[in-house]
Image: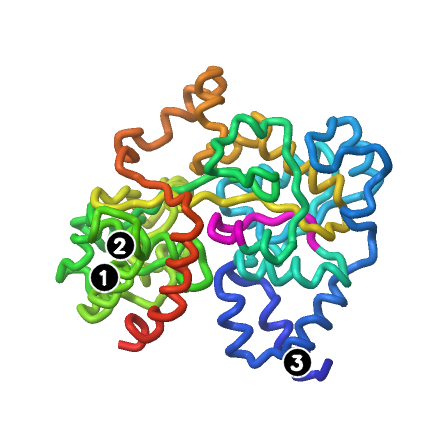
């Protein structure tokens, strides 16, 4: 690899948000061969998930004693796309490591769903990365491209059928709902609906969480706007039209609704996952800015995130142990502490396992009564295609 390509690699793979990988890679002019060479350097030649010990059911569930013993022999786990600031992953990572084996994530934590898939693709020849956390819309992609290893954890039957692959290739760990995260130090009259975002007082204030062609959070922001316009989830195009209108009016800012931008006021109204906003709200409760999280009354879509195991995972037992942990009562309650909606919430609630103090901090259930799921992956695929074709020309090109 040339010195110039090495420098591009440092720019691309250094600590950054998990959203902008593909766009940045293209902008930097990174060659496919250079990308492969870099991942080869990152990889290792440890045993892949296809080389399991004899007589062990790697499709799951595997008993914990076997998983723990073999994970400790492997000596660690590599997590890709597991950002500590999301859904209380900081505590999940910490506790998994304290109970079982160390976790290597660091810069890998900030990878986008699309970037995680690129890493998994390269793992056939250079195994790297054991587990990932990608948006629901990527489920069909990882199966079609043969990137994942199926595993059904011990709590598989608790997960609604529409939130998991029947063959065990992926499973929803948690979901979020689209919300408005409002800096009320700047916005004195917060919006309660997408319609309100067209208010003349919101010039250059409204932002989304990245590029919707690459970032699941941003995709669902546009999709929620479509729901607000039409009352259904048949097409994302009305959402694209809405953001084009918002841009033309001068209310839409290209700045990402990151924590830093919201705090600085560069994005005064962020359209993004509720759990991110609620976490920001708590973090700045004793300082500034004052933040308010609002579920839009006219359109909010819930977006599940799914756990995947790399087909060529260098630490296959640690990967499966991770899945057992995140779907355990303890793991699921950590998601809830991070204001994400754990996939096993109904089971935990029915069993009386949700602490009262935690329940008291959660938004009212009434706020979520109109939130919709899109479990039809054909609609999600169509939405992704429409964004790819129309976002640049119809929104950014204005």
State the residue lying farthest toward the left.
200
At mark 1, the secondary structure is helix
Q: Quadrant of the C terminus?
A: bottom left
Label 2 sits on a secondary structure element that is helix
Would you say the residues marked 3 and 2 are in contact, meaning their CB atoms lie under 8 Å apart?
A: no
Q: Which residue is mark 2?
A: 226
Magenta residue check for 198: no
Tell me which numbered mark, 3 or 2, is placed earlier along the sequence.
Answer: 3
Q: CA distance from mark 1 to mark 2?
A: 7 Å
Q: Is residue 280 visible?
A: no
Q: Is residue 132 visible?
A: yes
Residue plotted at (64% across, 27% down): 154
Q: Do callouts 1 and 2 mark residues in contact (Cβ within 8 Å)?
A: yes
Q: Position of residue 328 (x, y in %)?
A: 59, 28
Q: Earlier in the sequence, mark 3 or mark 1?
A: 3
Asked whether the beta carbons under mark 3 and mark 1 sit within 8 Å of each other, the answer is: no
The residue located at (51%, 31%) in the rendering is 159
Q: Which residues lie in the magenta part?
A: 129-140
Residue at 54 percent of width and 63 percent of height: 16
Q: Tell me the residue that label 3 is attached to.
A: 5
Residue 181, horizontal then vertical, whole percent = 31, 49
Residue 67 in the image: state x and y as whole percent.
76, 33
Q: Is 311 left or right of 373, judged from the image as shown?
A: right
> In front here: 239 or 289?
239
Per the rendering, the mark at residue 251 is: none
């Amino acid at each position: 690899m040339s010195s110039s390509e090495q420098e591009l690699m440092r720019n691309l793979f250094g600590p950054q948000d998990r959203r902008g990988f593909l766009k940045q890679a293209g902008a930097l002019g990174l060659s496919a061969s250079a990308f492969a060479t870099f991942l080869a350097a990152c990889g290792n030649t440890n045993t892949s998930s296809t080389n399991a010990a004899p007589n062990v059911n790697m499709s799951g569930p595997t008993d914990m004693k076997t998983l723990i013993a073999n994970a400790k022999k492997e000596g660690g786990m590599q997590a890709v796309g597991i950002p500590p600031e999301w859904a209380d992953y900081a505590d999940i990572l910490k506790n998994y490591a304290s109970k079982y084996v160390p976790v290597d994530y660091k810069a890998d934590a900030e990878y986008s769903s699309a970037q995680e898939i690129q890493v998994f693709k390269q793992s056939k020849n250079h195994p790297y990365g054991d587990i990932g956390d990608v948006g629901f819309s990527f489920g069909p992609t990882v199966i079609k491209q043969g990137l994942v290893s199926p595993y059904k954890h011990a709590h598989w039957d608790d997960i609604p059928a529409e939130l998991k692959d029947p063959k065990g290739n992926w499973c929803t760990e948690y979901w979020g709902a689209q919300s408005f995260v409002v800096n009320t130090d700047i916005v004195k009259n917060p919006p309660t609906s997408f319609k309100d975002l067209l208010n003349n007082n919101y010039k250059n204030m409204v932002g989304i969480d990245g590029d919707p062609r690459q970032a699941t959070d941003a995709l669902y922001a546009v999709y929620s706007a479509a729901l607000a316009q039409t009352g259904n989830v048949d097409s994302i195009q009305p959402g694209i039209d809405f953001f084009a209108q918002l841009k033309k009016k001068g209310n839409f800012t290209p700045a990402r609704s990151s924590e830093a931008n919201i705090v600085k006021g560069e994005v005064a109204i962020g359209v993004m996952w509720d759990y991110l906003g609620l976490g920001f709200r708590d973090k700045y409760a004793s300082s500034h800015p004052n933040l308010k999280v609002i579920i839009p009354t006219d359109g909010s879509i819930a977006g599940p995130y799914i756990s995947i195991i790399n087909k060529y995972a260098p630490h296959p037992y640690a990967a499966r142990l991770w899945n057992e942990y995140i779907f355990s009562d303890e793991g699921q309650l950590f998601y809830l502490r991070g204001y994400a909606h754990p996939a096993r919430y109904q089971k935990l609630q029915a069993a009386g396992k949700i602490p009262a103090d935690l329940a008291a901090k959660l938004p009212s259930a009434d706020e979520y009564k109109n939130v919709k799921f899109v479990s039809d992956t054909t609609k999600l695929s169509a939405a992704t295609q429409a964004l790819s074709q129309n976002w640049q020309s119809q929104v950014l090109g204005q």
